[in-house]
Image (cartoon, grey):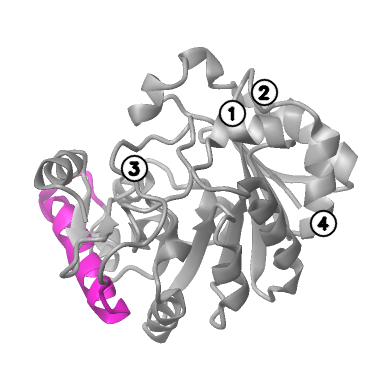
């Protein structure tokens, strides 16, 4: 799916490709590593109870995405907007992903700082964060992937940009938690920030928001707050939140990391208090409440 050079570059960054067709990958999250040495946990553990040291950060569609967001930390030069070529079966992807995670964490068996119980538990991940790179809903067998994860007693957090609305609507196996990214209050800001590569992207994203109330699983909207670009017009964000009727809204600061540093400036990264103030405005407009926060991750949760 990628050139050998591109794949090697990503592997140096910590990605591990799995499966026969190499469209899936794993990358161990910083918070998984921190949790193993008892230096903190991801805000998802605080907010939703998943265990950071047992979280598998992966994607079945690394090379494919319909957007080239300014805030994305990934190299987008090889990204394609639709699926091309064959695909691996869910069981092959999951087997490879779990094995790759074990290999990435094997050094902690000899780390004196590591919590030995957590090291052992991390060998059997129990939550799949299907969000590492690319647009997961472009993978042709997402139902099968979710079913196989659930058969293995995983919880699943599926993150979508909303542009594969037809695939979202046709899901028969729901994730444990469905995220839709909501990163702009209006079309102009959306096109500037998310840089969609397909026609009708704004309409498709809004179509996915309208589908959200039909899901029975936990539903979350995620807003990546980028200073000087999308931290504005809270009333329009509130209008879309009201249509989507999520259980929660995460408002999280853009972080100046990875390849995003070639597209944005450090000044675009808001401080926690700015995220909090913006969250207060959205909460007031939408009738939601601030129910939790994580200063370390610069994220505020509305519920």
Which marked residue is nearer to the observer: mark 4 or mark 1? Answer: 1
Q: Earlier in the sequence, mark 4 or mark 1?
A: 1
- In front here: 45 or 84? 84
Q: Quick one: label 3, few (<14), some, or many (20+) residues within 10 Å?
A: few
- In front here: 84 or 277? 84
Q: Quick one: label 1, few (<14), some, or many (20+) residues within 10 Å?
A: some
Residue drawn 73% across the image and 73% down it: 214
Is residue 225 something that shows in the picture? no
Q: CA distance from mark 4 to mark 3?
A: 34 Å
Which marked residue is nearer to the observer: mark 1 or mark 2? Answer: 1
Helix, strand or loop at label 2? It is helix
Residue highlighted by disc 4: 243
Residue drawn 59% across the image and 21% down it: 271
Q: Earlier in the sequence, mark 2 or mark 4?
A: 4
Residue highlighted by disc 3: 30
Question: Quarter holding the N terminus?
Answer: bottom left
Residue 252 quadrant? top right
Numbered badge on residue 192: 1
Q: CA distance from mark 1 to mark 2?
A: 25 Å
- In front here: 7 or 48? 7
Residue 118 quadrant? bottom left
Residue drawn 46% across the image and 47% down it: 42
Q: CA distance from mark 4 to mark 1?
A: 23 Å
């Amino acid at each position: 799916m990628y050139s050998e050079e591109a794949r090697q570059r990503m592997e140096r960054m910590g990605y591990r490709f799995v499966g026969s067709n190499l469209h899936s990958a794993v990358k161990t999250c910083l918070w998984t590593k921190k949790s193993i040495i008892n230096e903190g946990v991801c805000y998802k553990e605080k907010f939703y109870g998943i265990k950071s040291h047992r979280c598998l950060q992966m994607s079945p569609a690394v090379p494919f995405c319909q957007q080239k967001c300014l805030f994305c930390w990934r190299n987008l030069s090889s990204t394609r907007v639709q699926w091309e070529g064959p695909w691996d079966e869910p069981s092959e992807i999951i087997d490879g992903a779990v094995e790759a995670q074990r290999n990435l964490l094997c050094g902690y068996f000899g780390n004196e700082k590591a919590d030995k119980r957590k090291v052992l538990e991390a060998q059997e991940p129990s939550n799949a964060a299907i969000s590492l790179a690319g647009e997961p809903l472009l993978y042709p067998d997402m139902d099968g992937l979710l079913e196989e994860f659930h058969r293995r007693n995983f919880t699943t957090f599926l993150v979508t940009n909303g542009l594969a609305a037809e695939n979202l609507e046709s899901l028969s196996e729901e994730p444990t938690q469905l995220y839709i990214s909501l990163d702009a209050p209006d079309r102009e800001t959306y096109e500037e920030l998310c840089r969609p590569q397909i026609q009708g992207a704004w309409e498709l994203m809004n179509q996915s928001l309208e589908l959200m109330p039909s899901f029975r699983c936990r539903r979350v909207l995620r807003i990546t707050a980028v200073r000087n670009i999308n931290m504005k017009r809270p009333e329009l964000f509130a209008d879309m939140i009201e249509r989507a009727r999520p259980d929660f809204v995460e408002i999280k600061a853009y972080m100046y990391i990875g390849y995003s540093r070639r597209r944005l400036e450090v000044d675009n990264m808001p401080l926690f208090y700015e995220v909090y103030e913006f969250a207060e405005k959205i909460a007031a407009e939408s009738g939601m409440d601030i129910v939790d926060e994580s200063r370390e991750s610069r994220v505020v949760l509305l519920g």
